[in-house]
């Protein structure tokens, strides 16, 4: 009986073993397939980062290439102005392919944050490299490069002492001599937001009224056009971001160099709060499909290697303090910077726009 059972069981056991073995093999195969798949999809994720950017500088193209070569992560770029990109991300919602949003003003980064388009990022590298006033209080965006809003003037027509602060530009003495772009421009809105933060609403309104009275002409053109108008004698003093003058001084156009060399730059409010600064910066998109790559990408942009490119090509001040400034910026010398947290620029933006409107600043 036992023998019979053995005889009967034997082939069954063999078959069982075969079945078990087959199952094991197929399970292993399935596992290996699925882990391959996971590997593949992880690989896919790690191979690209989708960047929505408002920056339109050559330096950036070079940096994106450097990042690709270094990491093997492909950088896909969508370029448009910040408002368009913010609108695009809003419409795309959860399906947005955007991983990183880059804009050229803290006010716009704040707008993206308020619209729920960004997410908080915990990165030691970013926290240690970027001083806290140059990044969002919730780490939803990070400054990449710094620009000052400087005063550019004709030294033959006006003395530096008379125009040593933003406030002084609103003095009656400057009547008919001031060149500054339109109030629809975010750089001016952020400047106004900082003035509201430091001097209060009423003083800011008075300042805007004084500025409008002093304008040599209705606002038109960009910062460079204001500098050119100083040279042309349309006014004596202009407001411009630092890198525009830096670019003109290093321009391939002789005419631009001639204009830039004829004017002088001055960093306002050195005896007080310091010169108003702003950043171009980046944040990780709320629904970033490649979040890890997005963080890696932003970390790369603040590395010494990348910051050197920003500093050298675009005449901006690096956020990474280990990186040397461009020779032109060194020649201008160091200056006291306003340390206001740049988040405030965004928070005060609405009020800034209203204040401009009330003053009739076109
Ligand atoms: Fe600009």
Image (cartoon, helix red, strand yellow):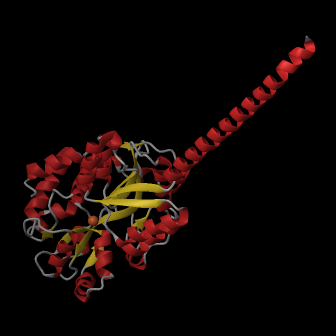
Q: Nearer the viewer, residue 223 or 1?
A: 1
Provide residue 130's location: percent of width, then percent of height. Answer: 47, 55
State ligand 1's quadrant: bottom left
Q: Is residue 163 left or right of residue 31?
A: left
Residue depicted at 74% across the width and 34% down the height: 21
Provide residue 55's location: percent of width, then percent of height. Answer: 32, 63
Q: Quadrant of residue 361?
A: bottom left
Q: Is residue 189 left or right of residue 70?
A: left
Provide residue 74's location: percent of width, then percent of height. Answer: 46, 61
- Quarter of the picture holding the N terminus: top right
Q: Indicate whether 241 appears above or below 130.
A: below
Residue 23 can be seen in this image = yes
Provide residue 63's location: percent of width, then percent of height. Answer: 44, 68
Q: Indicate whether 303 appears above or below 226.
A: above
Residue depicted at 50% across the width and 49% down the height: 292
- Quarter of the picture holding the C terminus: bottom left
Numbered-mark total? 0
């Amino acid at each position: 009986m036992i023998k019979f059972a053995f005889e009967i069981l034997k082939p069954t056991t063999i078959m069982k073993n075969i079945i078990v073995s087959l199952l094991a093999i197929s399970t292993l195969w399935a596992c290996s397939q699925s882990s391959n798949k996971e590997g593949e999809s992880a690989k896919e994720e790690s191979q690209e980062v989708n960047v929505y950017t408002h920056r339109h500088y050559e330096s950036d193209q070079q940096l994106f290439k450097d990042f690709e070569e270094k990491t093997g992560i492909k950088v896909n770029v969508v370029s448009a102005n910040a408002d368009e990109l913010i609108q695009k991300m809003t419409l795309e919602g959860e399906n947005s392919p955007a991983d990183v949003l880059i804009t050229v003003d803290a006010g716009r980064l704040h707008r993206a944050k308020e619209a729920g388009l960004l997410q908080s990022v915990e990165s030691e590298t970013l926290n240690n490299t970027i001083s806290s006033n140059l990044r969002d209080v919730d780490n939803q965006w990070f400054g990449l490069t710094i620009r000052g809003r400087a005063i550019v003037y004709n030294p033959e027509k006006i003395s530096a002492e008379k125009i040593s602060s933003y406030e002084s530009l609103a003095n009656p003495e400057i009547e008919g001599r001031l060149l500054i772009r339109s109030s629809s421009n975010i750089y001016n809105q952020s400047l106004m937001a900082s003035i509201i933060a430091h001097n209060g609403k009423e003083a800011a309104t008075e300042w805007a009224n004084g500025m409008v009275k002093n304008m040599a002409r209705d606002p038109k053109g960009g910062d460079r056009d204001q500098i050119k108008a100083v040279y042309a004698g349309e006014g004596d003093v202009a407001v411009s971001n630092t890198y525009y003058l830096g670019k003109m001084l290093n321009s391939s156009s002789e005419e631009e160099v001639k204009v830039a060399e004829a004017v002088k730059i001055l960093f306002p409010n050195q005896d007080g709060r310091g010169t108003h600064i702003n950043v171009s910066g980046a944040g990780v998109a709320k629904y970033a499909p490649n979040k890890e790559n997005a963080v890696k990408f932003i970390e790369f942009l603040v590395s010494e290697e990348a910051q050197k490119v920003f500093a050298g090509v675009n005449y901006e001040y690096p956020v990474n303090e280990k990186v040397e400034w461009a020779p032109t910026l060194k020649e201008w010398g160091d200056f006291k910077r306003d340390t206001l947290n740049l988040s405030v620029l965004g928070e005060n933006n609405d009020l800034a726009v209203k204040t401009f409107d009330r003053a009739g600043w076109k």
